[in-house]
Every structure is written in structure tokens, then in C-alpha cells.
Image (spheres, rainbow, N blue to C red):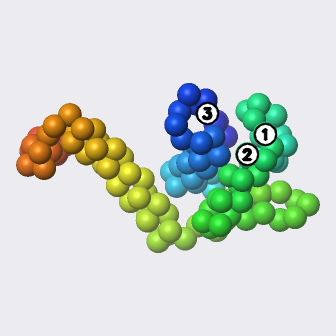
Amino acid sequence: MQILLNNNSMVPIYEQLMDQVKSEIINGTLKENDSLPSVRALAGELRISALTVKKAYDRLEEEGFVVTVHGKGTYVAATDRQLTMEARRKSVEDDFAVAVDRARSVGFSKDEIREIIGIILEDY
């Protein structure tokens, strides 16, 4: 598992960690029942607090992406096709929202944004 954290980002470290683990689960790099590094091992590798890793793992568990077995470790949860598709959709929606926010911030109207999207889609 390759995790890259940006200390200069406005996104909290635990969220960056969560997003990258989710991405690896969604794209199939991490599969059902694969074990994640221990909290201490990952914290040491990334040179961050173990509490930050624990918070990320806890949130991933709340969202149904991982399961923690006390004394054994944290594992990728059984994949739910609907959950996976919803996570993919949300990821794409988030990317679009960032792009639309940027376009709006430089003064583009809704019609201009739609025109840009139309042009991009024609190329595919």
C-alpha cells in the first residue's frame, strides 16, 4: 500500500489517509480480507501520530470499508457492489464540484461551464 501525504494541504492528514485507502479499495488494489498495516507500523512509516492513523481506520470502519478485529488487525471489509459504486460516484461528483467551483471563481457562468463540459465530452 503506497500512501503519500501532503503536509501543506488544507485537507487533514487523517482524511488524506482515508481517501487513499478508500481509493485503493474502490479500484481493486486492496481486495476483500487484505490486511492493512498495523496502526503503529503505518504511523511509523508515514512519520505521523498513531492517533491519526487510528482515527482514519475508525472512520473507514464506520463507513464500512474496513473491519477491525481486536488483537488481530484491520482488514478490507467484504465489498458491497452498491457501496463501491456509490463511493466511485461520490468521488467523481467531488472532482466535478472542485472544477465547477474553480470555474465559478474565475467568472464563468453556468452556460459557459456546460459548454466546456460539452467540448470535453465530444473528445471522448
> Image check: 84 left or right of 18?
left
> Image check: 53 left or right of 79?
right
| The C terminus sits in image quarter | top left
| The N terminus sits in image quarter | top right
Quarter of the view holding residue 120:
top left
Could you say where residue 30 lies in the image, as x and y percent from the top left? 63, 51
**Tag of residue 52:** 2
Could you say where residue 25 lies in the image, as x and y percent from the top left? 58, 54
Name the residue rendered at 60%, 65% in the picture. 63
Instruction: Indicate the amino acid at tag 3.
Output: Leu
Task: Judge by depth and name the residue closer to the eye, 53 or 1.
Answer: 53
Name the residue rendered at 59%, 47% in the picture. 15
Label 2 with label 1: CB-CB less than 8 Å: yes
Q: Earlier in the sequence, mark 3 or mark 1?
A: 3
**Tag of residue 49:** 1
Quote the CA–CA distance across marks 3 and 1.
13 Å
Assign a secondary structure to mark 1: loop
Instruction: Indicate the amino acid at tag 2.
Output: Thr
Name the residue rendered at 64%, 36% in the picture. 2
**63 lies above or below 44:** below
* Other-residue count near label 2 (Cα within 10 Å), few / some / many at <14 / 14–19 / ≥20: some
Task: Judge by depth and name the residue closer to the eye, 94 or 73.
Answer: 94
Residue farthest top in this picture: 8
- Which residue, given by chain and number where applicable, does mark 3 sit on? 5
Name the residue rendered at 72%, 53% in the picture. 55
* Other-residue count near label 1 (Cα within 10 Å), few / some / many at <14 / 14–19 / ≥20: some
Task: Judge by depth and name the residue closer to the eye, 27 or 94.
Answer: 94
> Image check: 85 left or right of 15?
left
Quote the CA–CA distance across marks 2 and 1.
5 Å
Could you say where residue 18 lies in the image, as x and y percent from the top left? 61, 50
Could you say where residue 3 lies in the image, as x and y percent from the top left? 64, 36
Assign a secondary structure to mark 3: loop
